[in-house]
Image (spheres, rainbow, N blue to C red):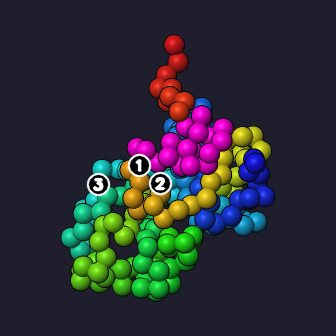
């Protein structure tokens, strides 16, 4: 079954089609956190930046959690996905075991008291955003494929393996697409 733009909703993973050349989204897996008539917002799950959040945010407790590029929009903003659920006030459920945002000051306290470990959270600089109708149009053009979001994709799967793993888990023809080697340049 082929996904259509009617399937776009919170808790889905957008998989870049295998031959996408856009450097921001090439072989990316983007968790869709918001989709409505005003537009869409998500975070790239497989673009680590090799910096830790405690080295990035002033007055942040010592915490060796790597920060990821959430996308090409507004790199001055910090976002996070976690599996803390109701433990973190004001967070939004994205999928089973995956929550977005929440009370940042309380998060710092939970980290300071070691109730939150790096395996419980993923931080993002910036985000991926689409204006009204833009993501639907990109879906119609075949730029993206949809998959269900599982907490393991966010918290346990290695970023270098994520795109291929999610594609493989879709089954059928997607298993074949997952095996297509990445083209790093044209001859």
How far, Cα to Cα, is label 3 from label 2? 15 Å
Residue at the (57%, 70%) spot, across then down: 95
Could you say where residue 119 lies in the image, as x and y percent from the top left? 33, 66
Q: Which residue is at the far top?
A: 187
Secondary structure under the numbered disc 1 in the rendered image: helix
Residue at the (50%, 79%) spot, across then down: 91
**Quick check: is 177 in the magenta stretch?**
yes
Q: Which residues are magenta?
A: 160-178
Q: Which residue is mark 2?
A: 45
Sequence-wise, the earlier of marks 1 and 2 is 2
Sequence-wise, the earlier of marks 3 and 1 is 3
Q: Which is in the foreground here, disc 3 or disc 1?
A: 1
Q: Which residue is at the far left?
A: 62
Q: Which residue is mark 3?
A: 51
Please name the predominant secondary structure of the magenta segment in the image. Answer: helix
- Check if mark 3's residue and mark 2's residue have beta carbons within 8 Å: no
- Check if mark 1's residue and mark 2's residue have beta carbons within 8 Å: yes
Residue 159's label in the rendered image is 1
Near mark 1 (Cα within 10 A), the count class, few <14, some 14-19 or many ≥20, is many
On screen, 151 above or below 25? below
- Along the horizontal axis of the image, is 105 left or right of 4? left
How far, Cα to Cα, is label 1 from label 2? 7 Å
Could you say where residue 141 lies in the image, as x and y percent from the top left? 75, 40
Secondary structure under the numbered disc 3 in the rendered image: strand
Could you say where residue 120 lies in the image, as x and y percent from the top left? 36, 70
How far, Cα to Cα, is label 3 from label 1? 15 Å
On screen, 80 above or below 181? below
Residue 114's label in the rendered image is none
Secondary structure under the numbered disc 2 in the rendered image: loop
């Amino acid at each position: 079954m082929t996904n259509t733009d009617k399937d776009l909703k919170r808790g889905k993973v957008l998989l870049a089609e295998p031959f996408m050349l856009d450097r921001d989204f090439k072989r990316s897996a983007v968790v869709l956190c918001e989709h409505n008539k005003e537009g869409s917002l998500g975070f790239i799950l497989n673009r680590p930046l090799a910096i830790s959040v405690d080295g990035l945010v002033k007055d942040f407790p010592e915490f060796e959690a790597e920060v990821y590029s959430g996308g090409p929009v507004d790199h001055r903003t910090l976002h996070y996905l976690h599996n803390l659920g109701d433990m973190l006030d004001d967070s939004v459920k994205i999928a089973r075991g995956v929550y977005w945002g929440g009370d940042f000051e309380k998060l710092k306290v939970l980290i300071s008291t070691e109730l939150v470990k790096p395996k419980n959270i993923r931080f993002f600089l910036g985000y991926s955003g689409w204006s009204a109708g833009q993501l639907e149009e990109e879906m119609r053009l075949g730029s993206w494929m949809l998959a269900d979001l599982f907490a393991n994709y966010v918290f346990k799967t290695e970023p270098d393996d994520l795109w291929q793993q999610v594609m493989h888990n879709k089954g059928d023809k997607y298993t074949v697409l997952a095996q297509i080697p990445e083209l790093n340049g044209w001859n």
